[in-house]
Image (spheres, helix red, strand yellow):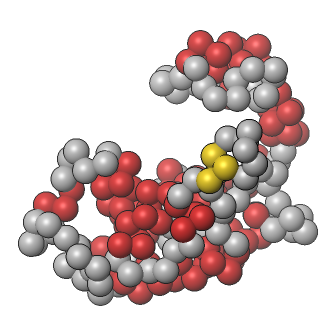
Amino acid sequence: MYKVASFKILSDKYLVNLAAQESGIRFSKHGRFESSIDYFLKTNHEFWKEIPNADINLREEYVNHNSTKRIRWVGRKTFSLWHQFLGGKELLALDVWVMKRLNKLGIEIDEDYIIPKRRTPKSQKNRLTPSKEDYLRIEREAYEIFSQDKRFLLPNERVDMTLVDAVLWWKGANRGSLNQYKLFDNGSTFPYSKKH
């Protein structure tokens, strides 16, 4: 699970399922990964070349159900993570930890995006995913907030959204154990936070 695997290994259904089961990965039973392995084996892999330089518009082409570029199972957050992992700086991956921190900065976030709820008495807890409009609004408002802090600006004066994501996720996901607030001058809150 924690080692880099070749495409040959990642496309071997038996090995992927075995590794998932041995690692205790959720959804590892009943060949859950087999349909996605089949799908990506048939996919034109040239799309990876576009991802590092993608912007919001190109991301929409890849996540839009009616687009010829559509990649199955990939939404805005996943595409944005791929963009960041491949060196991009333009897109924000809105996971629960990032949205919680943005909410503390004053950006309106629907509580159903950050607080899991049972949909039925026997179902597991789930969170809603932001709609296209809400995702783009949250991303835009985050960009506006961080554009006021030169520490988040690239040489071209654009906001480094990957750095924004990293700082917000780090604080949330580690539940405060590393106290990354010390990255900021006053040591306790974001200097531009609307909420304290």
Query: Camera-side residue: 52 or 139?
Result: 139
- Whether 118 is drawn above or below 140: the answer is above
Q: Nearer the viewer, residue 76 or 40?
A: 76
Which of 121/90 is in front?
121
Q: Position of residue 153 (x, y in %)?
A: 32, 77
Residue 61 x, y percent position in the rendering: 77, 70
Q: How many marks?
A: 0
Q: Is residue 123 left or right of 148 when viewed as pictured?
A: right
Above or below, 82 relative to 124: below
Quadrant position of the C terminus in the picture: bottom left
Residue at far left of view: 186
Q: Which quarter of the picture shows residue 81?
A: bottom right
- Can residue 142 be seen here? The reply is yes
Q: Is residue 153 visible?
A: no
Residue 11 horizontal/vertical position (percent): 75, 25
Which quadrant of the figure contains the N terminus?
Answer: top right
Question: Would you say 50 lies left or right of 173 here?
Answer: right
The residue that appears at 64% across and 69% down in the rendered structure is 130
In the drawing, does residue 15 fall left or right of residue 185?
right
Residue 193 figure quarter: bottom left
